[in-house]
Image: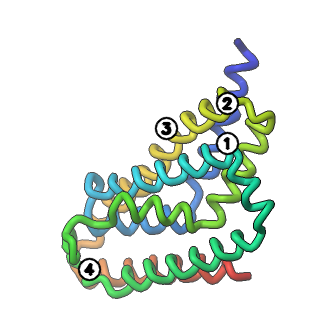
Amino acid sequence: MTATLSLYLSMASFALAASITPGPVNILVLSSGVQYGFRPSLRLVFGATAGFCLLLLLIGLGLHQLLETFPQLTTIIQWAGVAFLLFMAWKLFSSNGELGKSDAGTGPSVMTGAVMQWLNPKAWLASIAGMGAYAASGAPTLIWEFTAIYFVICFASVACWAYAGAFLSRFLGDPARIRIFNRIMAALLAASAIYLTL
């Protein structure tokens, strides 16, 4: 019982460290929280969490073998991720800065969050490292348990970024300040995309 609890705590700690630290997805979620508020941003949070956990589960069930067989897929994922991050950075940079308003009026979608994770090389590496550390034996029970723990921790961690953005929006106030904030976030997204090419 104690060994199992210790394993679960270790899994949760890994998930927390990987999920709450700054990265492209968290930058976008923070910006969404500022622009659209906490509740509308939960779609993006859910998409990012579900997308990552599906990737994690599939890695645990053997998807990593596909990358070993076709290593050029890693390069394709990397460049597609860079292109997607630059596209999202452009959208942030060109935002009008009006709170709660966009072309769709609802903020980034569930699919945006999921696609970001699947095109994020960091997400692939975290999935491979996590499954390698906690479910290297390939035991289905461990794979599902780790994925379930990760889902809860990841959702809560990414939601913190959305909440922080919603909190910040109170102090940014007018569209001009929001535009400056969005452009700073766009620059950070673009920098993270460029970092992936190094």
Q: CA distance from mark 1 to mark 2?
A: 8 Å
Assign a secondary structure to mark 4. loop
Assign a secondary structure to mark 3. helix
Residues packed near mark 4 inside 10 Å, few (<14), some (14 to 19) or many (20 plus): many
Residue identifier under label 2: 140
Front residue of this view, candidates 126 and 33: 126
Mark before the other along the chain sequence, 3 or 2: 2
Mark before the other along the chain sequence, 1 or 4: 1
Q: Of discs 3 and 2, which sits in the foreground?
A: 2
Residues under numbered marks 1 and 2 in contact, where contact means CB atoms less than 8 Å apart? yes
Residue identifier under label 4: 97
Mark before the other along the chain sequence, 3 or 1: 1
Residues packed near mark 2 inside 10 Å, few (<14), some (14 to 19) or many (20 plus): few
Which quadrant, please, contains the N terminus? top right
Mark before the other along the chain sequence, 4 or 2: 4
Quadrant location of residue 124?
Answer: bottom right
Q: Of discs 4 and 2, which sits in the foreground?
A: 2
Residue occupying the point 63% across, 83% down: 194
In the rendered view, would you say 57 is above or below 74?
A: above
Q: CA distance from mark 4 to mark 2?
A: 47 Å
Label number found at residue 61: 1
Assign a secondary structure to mark 1. helix
> Residue most toward the top?
1
Which quadrant, please, contains the C terminus? bottom right
Label number found at residue 152: 3
Residue 79: image location, x then y, percent: 62, 79
Q: Of discs 1 and 4, which sits in the foreground?
A: 1
Q: CA distance from mark 3 to mark 1?
A: 20 Å
